[in-house]
Amino acid sequence: MESLGIWAFGGLAIATIVANALFQSRFRASLALAPRLRAEPETTASLPTVSVIVPAYNEAINLRPCVKSVVKSELPDPTRLQVIVADDESTDDTAAIAHALAAEDSRVLAFTVPPRPTEVPWQGKNWACANAVEKATGDYLLFIDADVRLEPGAIAIALADAQRTGADLLSCAPSIVCGCLTEWLVQPIVIAMIAVGFDFTPVNDPAQPDKAFAAGPFMLFRRSAYDHIGGHRAVATTALEDVTLARRIKAAGLRLRYVLAGDPVKVRMYQDFAALWEGWTKNFYLGANR
């Protein structure tokens, strides 16, 4: 009986190893086939103006390093960059930090959004984004989350990529940064599970308008396309505004491009286990109910 148990345990261990190897193989294959953010060197010589919009609610920890990474962007003409921080009525020091950043760099504009109208149940960051757009002057609008960190060349590469491909919405899946043991144990597994089953081809195919996806942490719109689909005001009541905006882009006959960002765009999604659990639970729940 004891030997039977040993054999059973050994068989289970071998099966687990084989299954993990197959899973990792499929994961690597998925990544190898995925399109990536890229730009030809000569296309970055002349770039359009861009307004980077950072909606922020209780982001006192993240806001300064996020905005600092944006203003350090390497662009042919740094004056063609505008950064807008929209404080969404935070209860921590977010507003004070935002205004301090604006005082340090004239390209940064900080403001607190007005109270949300009661007649419309605005969800998530939609209200902050909609108000920020009214202050934007760029030919392109780049929406990023406060937990995003950009490498100096990220914006130039993204703008050049969008122009080269004719993308009206370029969204990038960022690299995930893990800062604690819990994140290292959970994040790679969850991301790998999502990546294995994800097919970029139909998402990027204009002939399949019903297939659309985008990643909220990094969404670069051509301003005219954003206005054409109604922007965040048109998706005010949805919590999955990124995917809904992507669907509206394709439904309007505009060009959607979704790629892996690689090192230029990084995000640390959750700072601790409680935030990680709440975040992924919400994401999976919302995704399952789409």
Image (spheres, helix red, strand yellow):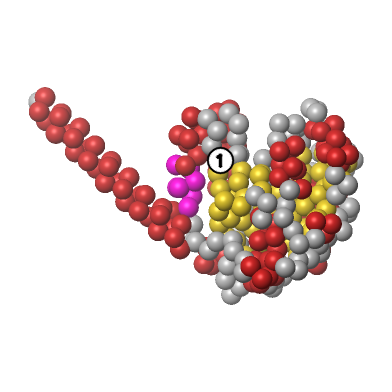
Q: Counting other residues with Cα less than 10 Å from the Cα at mark 1, is it few (<14), some (14-19), or many (20 or more)?
A: some
Residue 60: image quadrant is: top right
Asked if the magenta segment contains residue 193, the reply would be yes
User: Is there any visible trace of residue 270 in the rendered image?
Assistant: yes
Query: Which of 41/156 is in front?
Result: 41
Amino acid type shown at disc 1: Val
The x, y position of residue 135, in whole percent, is 89, 52
User: Is there any visible trace of residue 123 in the rendered image?
Assistant: no
Image point (32%, 45%), residue name: 20
Q: Which residue is mark 1?
A: 177
Q: Which residues are magenta?
A: 189-195
Image point (66%, 55%), residue name: 154
Give the SS element for disc 1: loop
Query: Which of 124/140 is in front?
Result: 140
Whether residue 265 is situated above or below residue 94 in the rendered picture: below
Residue 255: image quadrant is: bottom right
Overall secondary structure of the magenta section: helix
The x, y position of residue 12, in whole percent, is 23, 37
Q: Which quarter of the image is occupied by the N terminus?
A: top left
Image point (65%, 50%), residue name: 151
Residue furthest bottom in the image: 207
Residue furthest top in the image: 2
Q: How many marks?
A: 1
In this picture, residue 29 sits left or right of residue 85: left
Asked if the magenta segment contains residue 238, the reply would be no
The x, y position of residue 193, in whole percent, is 45, 47
Whether residue 268 is situated above or below residue 161 in the rendered picture: above
Image point (87%, 37%), residue name: 99
